Amino acid sequence: MYSNWPELDGSVAELFLKGDKEAFTTIYHSFAPGLLSYATTICGSQEQAKDIIQDVFVVCWEKRKQITADQLDRWLIKVTKNMSVKAFRRNVLTAGYLTDGSLEMADEIPEDNTPYLEEALKIVNALPPERKKIFLLSRIHQKSYREIAEELGISVKTVENQISSALKHIRCQVPVSEAVFLLCIVLMPLKTPPIGL
């Protein structure tokens, strides 16, 4: 858990698990904002994250009899994470983010790639701000080195050097896992998930 996560009222949770709709509404308004932020960090789109959170609470209501009151908050986090990672994976595989030789590597991404995703987020976000921006403009926005140079008012050579440095940094951080490296290459500009989730 992290510091800003709301305290779960046990009595409200118990009422919800018994089918009390008012308790469900209370839980939704307490947890939805934090879960929305978390989902957005993973899938990269707040609009998509909103749909995910709606689905999370629909499933929560449908499966309330299978959840215990003391585990409700952890259950919400886990389901949000799973749905968001699946959405991220669909985005990567269907929106053209796989470039160069990466497409052939797509099958190497594990279905449950949550640990890889979190590691990739940390690695890309550790890049210096300008280098990260150039890297994402190239890999995500599919802009040429010349287009990036013109947009940022720098030389093409500088762009080349920054991309090269970014790739070297990523490769050094993931000497073993090809899956992590692939996710770094195709990663959308996401923020790191809250500490403790």
Image: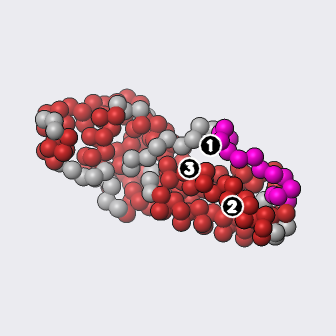
Q: Disc 3 marks which residue? A: 38
Q: Which residue is mark 2?
A: 28
Disc 2: CA contacts within 10 A as few (<14), some (14-19) or many (>=20):
some
Callout 3 touching callout 1 (CB < 8 Å): yes
Count every numbered label the image shows and give the total. 3
Q: CA distance from mark 3 to mark 1?
A: 9 Å
Mark nearer the viewer, 2 or 3? 2
Q: Give the quarter of the figure containing the N terminus.
A: top right
Of residues 152 and 86, the one nearer the viewer is: 152
* Residue 96 in which image quadrant: bottom left
**Position of 104 relative to 192 (above/below):** below
What is the spatial separation of the Cα atoms under label 1 and label 2, in whole angstroms?
19 Å
Report the amino acid beneath label 2: Tyr
Is 163 placed left or right of 126 in the picture? Answer: left
Instruction: Give the residue type that dot 3 points to.
Output: Tyr
Question: Of the residues shown, which amino acid type is indicated by label 1?
Answer: Leu
Tag 1 residue:
197
Q: Nearer the viewer, mark 3 or mark 1?
A: 3
Q: Is 11 included in the stretch rendered in magenta? A: yes
Q: Residue at coordinates 71% horizontally, 47% vertically from top-left?
A: 6
Q: Secondary structure at mark 3?
A: helix
Disc 2 element = helix
Does residue 166 lie above or below 38 as drawn? above
Q: Which residues are magenta?
A: 1-14
Report the front residue among 166 and 25.
25
